[in-house]
Image (spheres, coloured by chain):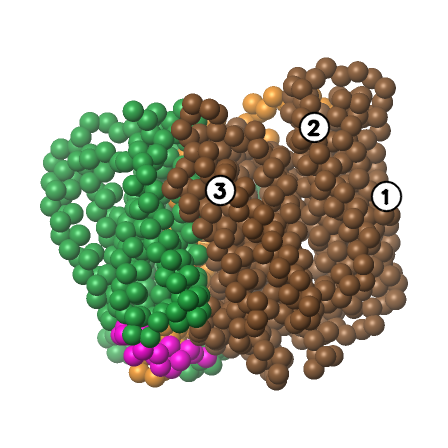
Chain colours: A green, B brown, C orange
Amino acid sequence: MSVIQALDIGLALLVLAVAGWTIAAREAFASVVGYVAYGLLLSLVWVRLFAVDVALTEAAIGSGVTGVLLISAVVRLRKTEAPAAAERPGVVLRALAAALCTVVAAALAAVVLLMPDPGATLAPEAGQHLGELGVGNPITAVLIAYRSFDTMLEKVVLILAVIGVWSLASDGNWGGVAGPRRGARPEGALAFLAQLLPPLGIVVAIHIVWVGANEPGGAFQGGAILAAMALIVLMARLTEAPEIRRRWLRLALIAGPAVFLVVGIAGFAIPGSFLAYPAGWAKPLILLIEAFMTLSIAATLPMLVIGPPDRPPS
Amino acid sequence: MLAMALALATTGGGYLLVLAVIVPVIGMLLSLVVGGRHAERIAFALMPAGLGLALAIAIEVWVTGQPLVYILGGWPPPLGIALRADGFSAVMLVTAALVIAAAGYFARGGFATPPGVAEKRAPLAFWTLLQGLWAALAVVFLGGDLFNLYVALELLTFAAVPLVCLDGRPETLAAALRYLLFALFGSVLYLLGAALLYGTYGTLDIVLLADRTAAEPLVAPAVGFAAGLMTAGLLAKTALFPLHLWLPPAHANAPPPASAVLSALVVKASFFLIVRLWFDVMPGLASAAVTTLLAALGAAAILFGSVLALRQARLKLLIAYSTVAQIGYLFLMFPLAIGGHPWSAEAWSGGVMQTLSHAFAKAAMFLAAGVVYEQLGHDRIAELRGIGRAMPMAIFAFGLGGLSLMGLPPSGGFAAKWLLMQASVESGQWAWAVVMLVGGLLAGGYVYRVVAPALDRATVALKAPASRRREAVALALALGAVLLGFAPPEFFDLLQIGRPVAMAALR
Amino acid sequence: MSAAILAGLTGAALVGLGLYGLLTDPHPLRKILAFNILGSGVFLLFGIIARKGAAAGFAADPVPQAMVITGIVVAFSATALAVTLLLRLFQETRRATLEPDAPAKTPDAGVDG
């Protein structure tokens, strides 16, 4: 067994152990902390699968932004843990559930082992058109060209989620500053970080979006980093979240899918197909869409994390 | 081979499919940006356009006798995504457009932005979510790729769940959260199945998958497992017994126009995908054991849902349990319509007819119940004595909808149950016919529980004046369910277009 | 055993773990966490399928990878909506339970046909 193999096995065991901790931990807070660590470990697994784009997304969204969301929730829900624990199903039911889950996992494992290797793939087809699209990263080509319809709709999913989250405000607070009321401005490390990190983060994010056409990266990863910067600034209370009635905020939310749709509809005229790019124009149009998608993701994710407004508009 | 080539190239009129999806998406985005009372105006301006597009698609499918296809971005599958409309998609699109328009018209006033207010929470959320839901349904009915359909299912979930708790009462919040967890559980199982299919066949396009599974059925154990996972996930979203627990509290506590759309359309979307999966993607895998199991769960749903509907104290809960029962009927089509038997075509028509007529009937009943609740301030069945005189149209609408649920002529429900019953007799599967008869009797029982006291000669104290407009909307939908009973033979021809076995015979 | 197979087996085990948490833990927040673990297990299976599809000079098939990126974003929005719903439920009832009969503040409570 080589060193790499031993490391791989160690990583897999560690991921499973932390996931098991997340499920089994007695206190919800410990469970959430476990989950954040789990997300980071998982992104290492993605690197080992040669999926750097996914690893970046998992680290930024799956672990980072989700982590902020879950930690703030678990703190507020602390009092509900004891009553809920009383509703825990009995040993027999849990044993039955465990048996069922073991069967499902074992069947899946068998399927994985029996799958042909090399397996079915679209990699050659996906690679064929990179030249005409002018992008080097095949994942960007899938997301913004071959399966752009999915990507556009998925951004609509995010917007519906924001509307859903906002709809949980009370009537009187509609239109107000997004997120819960916060206490005094924190001093020390957080405030310092909040001033130091964002300029750096913005540069990194723009870089990731820009190189995403050819290297790992793109709108999702860049947008998620920008969103994380916005969250740090909001948590340090360097600035107030926007009021949800603001036109500019809503424009930022829909900019990505709107530009996607405009380019898509223009495709009806030239070259004659919805969501198709005219020859020679693919690269600039892809970059245009990516830029607005980044903006929308950077606006959407913090809105989803901080939640509905908690005070009336000014 | 010819059919295969046809399914991978854009057909004439294919652009209509794109418009059917993007019109409500554009409406939703615009409504959010301009906000306030404009959200409602935009939704209303686009509803006729949506209905027109759905009708145009249905006419185009009917005239050409072939499914419509649009290749998005000019990237044909397996790399790209196709939209396709067959007869079933077309009639579902028209039904969705009609029910959504009716629910929207009913919601006017209830979800209006009052004068002097720039924007209010519930109206903005309602009108944007309604358009989002409409877009999601369009993608579900037209999507030709299993991952694209996953995104569509999520779109549907995110539009439907917040509608349940728009009024913010605690029980609606718990119902919405429960609904969300069930729906997410369903999507993740579906996605897992899709992953295994992609790993086996290297495509998620429905037509290509159908071709490849037919060429090498059960090439790997992964395929059967994938089909099972996807079906289980979709059953959780369809609320087929015993995965129905989330449905009654969610559908019964939502605002009436939302309940109507949820019960009439949203549960049908995941049912539609189960049909796609077993009839289109892998008909070879639909063994007698599989179809019998689905129908047996359906039969259990019919009996269980109907009995519980008989025992409810609240009108809206009664209607919600009736949905649990009526969903059961949908699954009786599986053992009857699969394959190329002489009775398969009529069983298919019966299943589709049940989907459509229940949509109209159930939307009508939920809206009628909304009128009752609004005017009485409650919906306790024990205190409905004499309301027939105060709101005759609403009670008539409820009764007509009930007629269709019972399967009495003239109604779409009668046509549906008659076709299914004929198929079960012809195929020698008597048990399903018996279940349908018992279900019809039980439905008669729970409809009678409401209608009989309502027609009593008693006076009731009304909290609010009657809204004839809303009663009329409910009645119009109920008449739609009745009208389906008079569908001409050409309508049944339309339903057969694109049905795999029917197409194989044409080839 | 290759890294891909190992990741696939890990994914299968994660699906089992997540499923167990989703079924047995009564607390909605823990259910949400379990749903995320279940989801990431499914994503890992996409990952191994992508890796087995290495061809044409690519280390992995880009199509399933793109699907995972879409899936991660959708899973996050689902988590956000579920957490917000849960927090609102807690705000209203001071509890976090999905038992339908628990918050008995309905106007119709106690009346039965």
The residue carrying mark 1 is: B441
Question: Label 1 crowding class (10 Å Cα cut-off): few <14, some 14-19, many 20+?
Answer: some
Residue A299: in sight, yes or no? yes
Residue that appears at 55% across and 38% down: B164
- Residue A32 placement (x, y as % from top left): 34, 45
The residue carrying mark 3 is: B42
- Disc 3 marks which amino acid? Ile
**In the drawing, does residue B371 fall left or right of residue A154?**
right
- Identify the secondary structure beneath mark 1: helix
Residue A168: in sight, yes or no? no
Q: CA distance from mark 2 to mark 3?
A: 25 Å
- Disc 2 marks which amino acid? Arg
Residue A133 lies in magenta, yes or no? Answer: yes
Q: What is the quadrant of residue B143 in the picture?
A: bottom right
* Above or below: residue B465 compared with residue B110: above
Which tag, 2 or 1, sits closer to the chain's start? 1
Residue that appears at 72% across and 63% down: B495
Say which mark, if any, is on residue B468: 2
**In the drawing, does residue B485 fall left or right of residue C85?**
right
- Give me the chain letter of mark 1: B
Q: What's drawn in magenta, residue-wise?
A: A120-138
- Residue A309 placement (x, y as % from top left): 35, 32
